[in-house]
Amino acid sequence: MSMKVVVVGAVAAGPKAAVRIKRVDPSAQIVLIDQDSLISYGGCGIPYYVSGDVADENDLRKTSFHMLRDEFFFEKAKGVTTMTSTRVLSIDRTNKSVLVEKLKTGEQEEISYDKLLLATGSEPIVIPIPGVELDGVFTISDLHKAIAIKERIAKGLVGKAVVIGGGAIGIEMAEALKDLWGVETSIVEFQNQLLPNLVDWEMSEILVRHLRDNDVEVFLSEGATEIISDGDGKACGVKTNNRTLDADLIILATGVKPRSSLASATGLHVSATGAVVVNERMQTSDPDIYAAGDCVEITHLVSGQKFFAPLGSLANKQGRVAGDNIAGVPSTFKGGVGSFIMKAFDMSIGSVGLTFHGAKNSGYDADISLTSPIDRAHFFPTQAIACFLLIFDRRTRRVLGMQGVGPMGDGILARINGAAPLLGEGATIEEFANIELAYAPPFSAAIDSVNAAAYVAENLCDDRLRKINMPEYLKFIDDLDTEPDWVMLDVRHEKQAQPFIDKFGPQRWLSLPYEQVRDRYQELPQDKTLIIICNAGSRSYEIQRFLDHVGYENSLVLAGGINVIKRMNVDWLPE
Amino acid sequence: MSMKVVVVGAVAAGPKAAVRIKRVDPSAQIVLIDQDSLISYGGCGIPYYVSGDVADENDLRKTSFHMLRDEFFFEKAKGVTTMTSTRVLSIDRTNKSVLVEKLKTGEQEEISYDKLLLATGSEPIVIPIPGVELDGVFTISDLHKAIAIKERIAKGLVGKAVVIGGGAIGIEMAEALKDLWGVETSIVEFQNQLLPNLVDWEMSEILVRHLRDNDVEVFLSEGATEIISDGDGKACGVKTNNRTLDADLIILATGVKPRSSLASATGLHVSATGAVVVNERMQTSDPDIYAAGDCVEITHLVSGQKFFAPLGSLANKQGRVAGDNIAGVPSTFKGGVGSFIMKAFDMSIGSVGLTFHGAKNSGYDADISLTSPIDRAHFFPTQAIACFLLIFDRRTRRVLGMQGVGPMGDGILARINGAAPLLGEGATIEEFANIELAYAPPFSAAIDSVNAAAYVAENLCDDRLRKINMPEYLKFIDDLDTEPDWVMLDVRHEKQAQPFIDKFGPQRWLSLPYEQVRDRYQELPQDKTLIIICNAGSRSYEIQRFLDHVGYENSLVLAGGINVIKRMNVDWLPE
């Protein structure tokens, strides 16, 4: 007799599992159920639909060969019985059946299963402030909301928007609103940086600068405290602890949480954070019930801890693994490393693994290398600077994470992809130093950015390089009196140093070009701490090595160099 | 007493090692020697210099901060004594010294060493045909030759060019000549494909088509037999076994070989192919003599065999490792996987690991998955099709290699980089199926091309997918009578199938759209072999699974689908 499978949830993991089961075991009888009328759509594409890059909402619902993935498609093309606008009310684990209600008719039905898959996804976190229920306040939780937002904009009803939450979806929505529609847009984020938990502060500051350059206002360390009503049930603004912002449209993008009420109601193991607990075969605490996608937590392959990674790419992988196991092909999903990439106007920003702060909090002896190399052969016309942060454990020399930001294109992706596979294998900085990424002048430097970042990390671990990190340096620049003994040694060309000398004075900002240091180092003060500065940090490192050798041992290299500062959100740079 | 190091060769590995030693051990006394007057230049940039993308030859010699890397730079900035136009005549291993001759004066000098590094690079293979010594025939072996070529073109002396050799340098040179200068250019390659040993025939055919679309003629399976003289010492054409091509400029790009005469003359272990043999510490058979860069052979981390990989990126890595060991920091270079990427007009093509034919020759039970996915979310406006070949061993399920070709940009690089790190670790197709490459709609599909390729490989290994490979299929199309029982089952839209039906007749080309097969499969002939065809192969696979289930078991899926054929060098496609 053929196996009966019920799949609850039909956006990413659910449909993937359903069709995979059908291909592995064509005799399986599969029922795919979703409470929504729209299923199997590219939810990650919503910002691009709102922006107009994707013209029609149906484009998010189509296959690559232009067929609409509706219930008829799943029935006809895939052989999967599909029930939309149908809610699963409860699971009877003893009798192995689910009770469903058809939302349009109220009709209830019991459907039996041999294997059950929960792919119930995630739901937006709605922060508990007054006014979130007002008209004009939207979460980005499904395609219906996206359609409603776009309709309002297209009708000319939106002049100003506030995005609450500086995560990926918030930033993508801000770009969508500003770039194509010209909506005056602000982002309000209660943490002191954008993309918290995905990148560290240095990277965020580069992104903040770029958003502001593109006329998106960013208010950090500001929590939204209230959504203001126009007295008529419509939202008209957002209050933060610092200001009031007018808005016709308010996007709540304060994160998502696993949708696991069905799992917990039926007594399955659910984590403290509300995620369904599964093993590597994607089985819940009931071996006949599987779960996959945004509703589960997975193992972080760097930290070994559980984490919540709601991403379409992981949902598909988990759906396929769950499908294999249900269909009788043993298969495992071991966990993830949090590979992340996003577009923000003309910039791309990516990360993988742990952030520096995440690593510190997780108990690692974490340190960082901040680099700002040229992203291809420096003589190649399309070359540009990218900035990278490599996070590593000084004790074990293991690489814990990497972040990169650079011009829009696939260059940052290429480095994140190069780092991700080994990260979950416990690779050390020595292994990263020799990762063999592909090289030709139109694509990369002979020493790829990933290798170069590892070189710096190695020099740090071996105490061949002493640095000052960017936050500490910028704090010092804010108030020079805090470190009266610090003197900048600018080893760039005199012309590049001169505006800094003019601004900071010749006592604080010394110019001694790189190639002259070996001849002229005796001119340097020996009773000061020299902060060695160049564009990318590599010349500074070389000079530090030489100065140590000749007995001038009191120096620190400014990690990342002027290249990084120039791209950050700072206002004190001369010129 | 400080250590004395002599480094022979000052292009990539040599300078890298010299400056690394100096940074790790600033007290070291280093002498860097090269027979050329120009050193430390970006040799891989030569085609871009010839094309004019790089305006001045000195741009290839400069650091990223615009300093010329000449002997004075190495002396002043790096503290490395540098002797250019100086040849090392012999090595006295007993007394640990080298005898050098200054080429300009004939003056000889003995220089002692504690450690010696050979970074003598590679030299072009000059095929033994008449006329290679004529004026107008160039190898791409150093910057002087590049300058001479560009001078001739700039003076308008070159109307037609022939490139002998269809490897990476030959193709890059052909693009340089054709694209900017409009030189009528042909490539002559005696093998039946371009980029032999780097990609397989399918990928080469896509590249051939693209070169022809860009007006570069490509003659495969044609060996150059003679370079024709104008009777006045100047080359004026190339004869092959098939034709005679006029040419004012002839580029010999028939590969390079290690430059190892110095090593062999001093009795160091040199391989049968002429490469210096080193261990993982980059030591030669004399532990005080190291070698690095294009003159050595390295371990292929997939096959375990030795191979010759003359690439600037590897030379730099090896130079750093050699430098570390010389300076007293134990360090290893374990080998390579042959990561490769190149630009060809508006296309990029990359590979890593073994080719299918290389793997077969190496004894593997090799098979391939050929896929043609969309390179980012299919609803994202900049999406385009890329083609991938994954090579794997059916016996161990190990991935052996990957190749990709797609639009110019860093998209193919991002996949090669994602595949390379695990390839050397013996990763299986199951591991490739779950590699977590970064995802967002502007960058990739939710199921990345690398994962998708592994899915297909898994289905092949598990005998869930039976395919026909492209070479066999194209041979059949060439002569349909060879397989009278083969009938095409086109599961694309009827409109897409119609021109094929018109061309091949309704007996040979059946149209039954994907979504109708479950309802109408009984219309299909049961006594024929069905060749199932769609754009990318995935619908075909799904249909095969269904047909097998309902007892129509005589089918093969056309791997890669029409997407691949459309991009290949074929002339029979309707419309």
Image (tube, coloured by chain):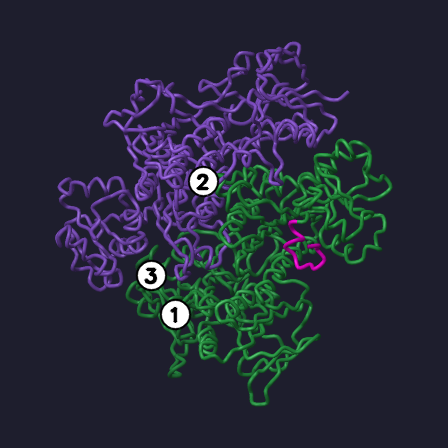
Chain colours: A green, B purple
Q: Residue at x 38, y 21 (%)?
A: B135
> Percent position (x, y) of residue B204?
34, 38
Residue A555 in the image: above or below residue B514: above
Left or right of A518 in this view: B334: left
Residue A163 in the image: above or below residue A18: below
Q: Nearer the viewer, residue B111 or B204?
A: B111
Identify the secondary structure beneath mark 1: loop
| Label 1 and label 2 in one chain | no
Left or right of A281 in this view: B97: right
Q: Residue at x 60, y 66 (%)?
A: A166
The residue indicated by pointer 3 is: A28
Identify the secondary structure beneath mark 2: strand
Pointers 1 and 2 in contact (CB under 8 A)? no
Q: Nearer the viewer, residue B32 or B112?
A: B32
Look at the image and tell me in which quarter the N terminus of chain A lies: bottom left
The residue indicated by pointer 2 is: B341
User: Mark 2, chain letter?
Assistant: B
The residue indicated by pointer 1 is: A56
> Percent position (x, y) of residue B86?
59, 18
Residue A417 in the image: above or below residue A458: below
Q: Nearer the viewer, residue B139 or B15?
A: B139
Pointers 3 and 1 in contact (CB under 8 A)? no
Identify the secondary structure beneath mark 3: loop
